[in-house]
Image (cartoon, helix red, strand yellow):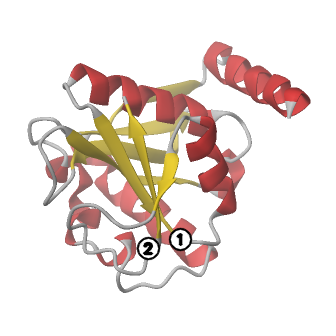
Amino acid sequence: MYFQRIINDFLIYHALISPQVEIRPIMNTDNQSVAKIIRQVLEDLNVPKVGTAYADKSLDAMFESFQNEGAQYFVVSKNNRLLGGAGIAPLNGADNDICELQKMYFLKEARGHGYGELMMQRCLDFAKAQGYTKCYIETMPYMAAAQKLYIRSGFQKIDQPLGDTGHYSCTVWFLKTL
């Protein structure tokens, strides 16, 4: 565990000092690339196309979907090529102080380089700045690497879903007090 933390810290440091890596808010010109990345990752992981982010109407219009108050989607790019993204938005059907980490997906080539932890921190910083007091995440049971990141980031498993995401195929839920 100790050595894994040292390795993770090194990867984050390397990602931070690499001038070719950028985390920024999504732009409308990113819509097609972001949708393609998310669908590719979900297909690679054999995620059901129904009851998950794959079927979300917002997937082809991510920029527009995150223009509401208290919402922001970020993308990570290296050498001007998008590698993934994640967003924060109010959790539908929940108290106003609860946000949801949404659509956090990275291409295979971007995993293991610390981008997930950088993106998580960017999203949680945004959530805190918006006044949220809790952050919710839902995922699939076999997405073990993502679950490890959530736990390292201070999320705790909960026994039932919160809000109304429409992702009935996601059966693992996490919550973090911000």
Label 2 and label 1: CA atoms lie apart by: 5 Å
Q: Which badge, 2 or 1, comes first in the chain's sequence?
A: 1
Residue 108, image x, y percentages? 68, 57
Q: What type is the residue that disc 1 sits on?
A: Met
**Crowding at label 2, few (<14), some or many (≥20) Cα neighbours within 10 Å?**
some
Q: How many marks?
A: 2
Residue 115, image x, y percentages? 60, 35
Q: Is residue 70 left or right of residue 55?
A: left
Instruction: Name the residue rendered at 60%, 24% in the picture.
Output: 20
Residue designated by label 2: 170
Residue 49, image x, y percentages? 42, 84
Q: Is residue 118 left or right of residue 144?
A: left
Q: Residue furthest front?
A: 159
Q: Nearer the viewer, residue 116 or 34?
A: 116
**Crowding at label 1, few (<14), some or many (≥20) Cα neighbours within 10 Å?**
some
Residue 63, image x, y percentages? 22, 47
Instruction: Examine the rendered structure and indicate whether residue 164 appears above or below residue 48.
Output: above
Instruction: Examine the rendered structure and indicate whether residue 15 appears above or below residue 88.
Output: above
Q: Nearer the viewer, residue 29 or 177?
A: 177
Q: Quadrant of the C terminus?
A: top left
Instruction: Examine the rendered structure and indicate whether residue 92 appears above or below residue 164.
Output: above
